[in-house]
Amino acid sequence: MSLIKNLIKEPEIKSKAKNDSGNSDEEKKPKPIIKSALDLQRLKLEKLMKNPDKPVIIPEHRKEKDFMQSVPTFVRNVMGSSAGAGSGEFHVYRHLRRKEYARQKMIQSKSHQELLDEEYQEKLEQNRRLAEEKTAKKRAKRLKKKGRAKRTKQSNPKELVTASDDDKSNDSESETETKNTDSNVKNEEANEVNTKEKKEN
């Protein structure tokens, strides 16, 4: 929020300085109105581009405090079991309790993160395995097709026919077959007629 205020205040200060110098004829720059995140981002970029030589400080990712790696702390003041004993040391107890809770929370979050990482790795492995199976299946199909084409080429070395020529030849063969069957039927009918005529004579 302070960044937004700084971005808005900057033009106001400059306009006041200009008015003090006696340049009241110049138009006042309107106060920037931030309606969306886009406007805010544009203001930030404009501010950065006003002085491009100025180094930009990019904050590093904050690392979580690792209670396991830190120097082990020893509990020297062990609380007594009788009522009221060590009641003046409650702040010490509260500090130790808070520390222990933080340690337990860190252990749980670490185990949860490890579980998520393990699931992610399993999923990646499964996807890789499925992809390999798919490619192996397609490879086998390609090789089978290639082998069939090679065998047909070796058995019929004179016939170098492409797929389109095969289709054309199949069509022409079917046409000739239909013509042949039609002519055969006509010939048979003619033969029957001839035999009947001979019998009658």
Image (tube, rainbow, N blue to C red):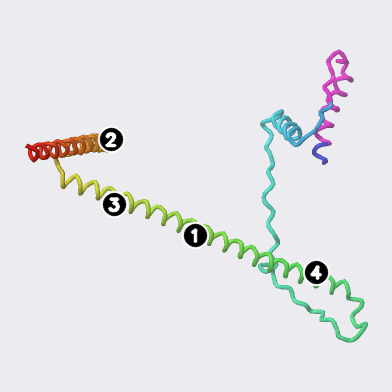
Q: Nearer the viewer, mark 3 or mark 1?
A: 3
Mark 4 or 1, nearer chain start:
4
Residue 22 is one of the magenta-drawn residues: yes
Tag 1 residue: 126
Q: Local crowd at mark 4 within 10 Å, few (<14), some, or many (≥20)?
A: few
Image coordinates of residue 19 in percent, x first then y, are 88, 19
Residue for badge 3: 144
Among the two numbered marks 3 and 2 on one chain, the one whose residue lies closer to the N terminus: 3
Question: Of callouts 2 and 1, which one flags the residue occurring earlier in the amino acid sequence?
Answer: 1
Residues at circles 4 and 1 in contact by the CB criterion of under 8 Å:
no
Q: Vertically, is 180 above or below 50? A: below
As rendered, which of 135 and 160 lies closer to the eye? Answer: 160
Q: Amino acid at mark 3?
A: Lys
Q: Secondary structure at mark 3?
A: helix
Q: Amino acid at mark 2?
A: Ser
Question: Is residue 133 part of the magenta span, yes or no?
Answer: no
Q: Is residue 104 left or right of 156 when viewed as pictured?
A: right
Q: CA distance from mark 2 to mark 4?
A: 81 Å
